[in-house]
Image (spheres, rainbow, N blue to C red):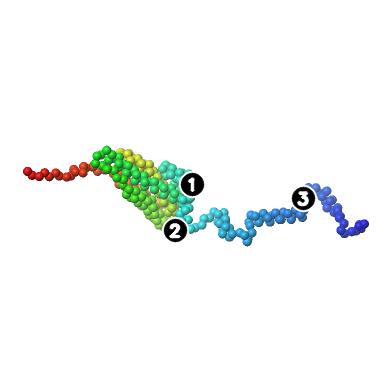
């Protein structure tokens, strides 16, 4: 038989039992439970963070950069730099086109619609559509004017596409470039002026040309009053978008500078519209018969 003083015999801890009976709401912690919780925490930490040996440092940099909301700065001569300006949703392009066609007084196009996120997708396709609209409408208008004349033979003028593309894209890029350089120079002199980036100015000028697409389609009809009316309406809408957008950038400048900048914006816009109308939709010269200038010489008797 085992001795009563055997050290290996199981003994009940009476003091612990008495304490539990005295305070039954007390929380007990088991050593085994602590070990299980420690193991679970270690496993969960290993699943979320990953081991130091298996984690890719490049992936960690991308995750931290994405969480911090920062973008990588890439050179402007790379494809990735311009790729960000074509990453835009369709409804955003629709909103910007509507905002350029229906300007509202007191609304800045850049602050309301761009929100520091300019795009080149909309301006590129607006300029391209306007180029083909001018060229095609000019050919159709010329065909309708000479329709029914016996000495007229229709020949499509493909050179109008090149001329229209040169005029439209030069206006959409060179004028914003000059305006951006001038505003940057004035901003260095006067520190409290509102500054716009070059892409924002290009975006505004590109979307401001969207109103000319339906106006050019109306120029097919051989009515001068309709053409000039559409030109005036398009000039008012497009010019108002440009003036309300760039007014905050020059309103604190010298009055002469304000007048010069606003006048230049309106004049270049008007030159584009009137120049396209005068060149592609000018009044045709009256056709002369092929032998009208020939002088018949009869031999003397």
Looking at the rendered structure, the secondary structure element under dot 3 is loop
Which of the pair 233/170 is nearer the observer?
170
Q: Earlier in the sequence, mark 1 or mark 2?
A: 2
Q: How far across and down, in percent of the image, does residue 29 sit? A: 77, 53
Q: Residue furthest right?
A: 1
Left or right, 299 with respect to 132, comes to left
Q: Say which residue label 1 marks.
A: 89
Which of the pair 65/140 is nearer the observer?
140
Left or right, 168 with respect to 68, comes to left
In contact (CB < 8 Å): disc 1 and disc 2: no
Q: How far across and down, in percent of the image, does residue 123 sit? A: 42, 48
Residue 27: which disc? 3
Q: Say which residue label 2 marks.
A: 77
Give me the C-alpha separation between circle 3 and circle 2. 67 Å
Q: Earlier in the sequence, mark 3 or mark 2?
A: 3
Q: Residue at x 41, y 43 (%)?
A: 101
Left or right, 46 with respect to 28, comes to left
Q: Residue furthest left?
A: 301
Q: How far across and down, in percent of the image, does residue 152 sit? A: 26, 42
Which of the pair 210/110 is nearer the observer?
210
In the figure, 297 relative to 174: above or below?
above
Q: How far across and down, in percent of the image, does residue 248 sit? A: 43, 49
Looking at the rendered structure, the secondary structure element under dot 2 is loop
Crowding at mark 3 (Cα within 10 Å: few <14, some 14-19, many 20+): few
């Amino acid at each position: 038989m085992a001795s009563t003083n055997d050290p290996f015999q199981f003994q009940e801890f009476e003091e612990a039992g008495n304490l539990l009976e005295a305070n039954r709401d007390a929380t007990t912690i088991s050593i085994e439970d602590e070990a299980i919780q420690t193991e679970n925490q270690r496993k969960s930490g290993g699943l979320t963070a990953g081991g130091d040996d298996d984690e890719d440092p490049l992936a960690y940099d991308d995750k931290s950069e994405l969480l911090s909301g920062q973008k990588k700065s890439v050179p402007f001569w790379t494809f990735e730099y311009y790729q960000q300006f074509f990453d835009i949703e369709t409804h955003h392009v629709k909103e910007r086109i509507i905002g350029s066609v229906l300007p509202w007084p007191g609304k800045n196009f850049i602050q309301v619609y761009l929100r520091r996120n300019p795009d080149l997708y909309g301006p590129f396709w607006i300029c391209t559509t306007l180029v083909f609209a001018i060229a095609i409408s000019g050919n159709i208008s010329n065909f309708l004017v000479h329709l029914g004349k016996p000495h007229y033979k229709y020949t499509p003028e493909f050179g109008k596409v090149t001329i229209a593309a040169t005029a439209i894209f030069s206006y959409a890029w060179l004028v914003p470039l000059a305006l951006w350089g001038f505003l940057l120079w004035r901003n260095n002199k006067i520190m409290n002026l509102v500054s716009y980036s070059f892409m924002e100015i290009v975006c505004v000028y590109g979307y401001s040309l969207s109103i000319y697409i339906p106006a050019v389609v109306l120029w097919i009809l051989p009515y001068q009053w309709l053409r000039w009316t559409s030109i005036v309406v398009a000039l008012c809408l497009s010019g108002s978008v440009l003036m309300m957008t760039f007014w905050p950038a020059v309103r604190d400048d010298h009055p002469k500078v304000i007048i010069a900048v606003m006048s230049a914006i309106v004049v270049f816009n008007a030159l584009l519209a009137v120049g396209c109308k005068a060149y592609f939709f000018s009044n045709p010269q009256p056709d002369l018969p092929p032998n009208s200038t020939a002088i018949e010489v009869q031999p003397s008797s």
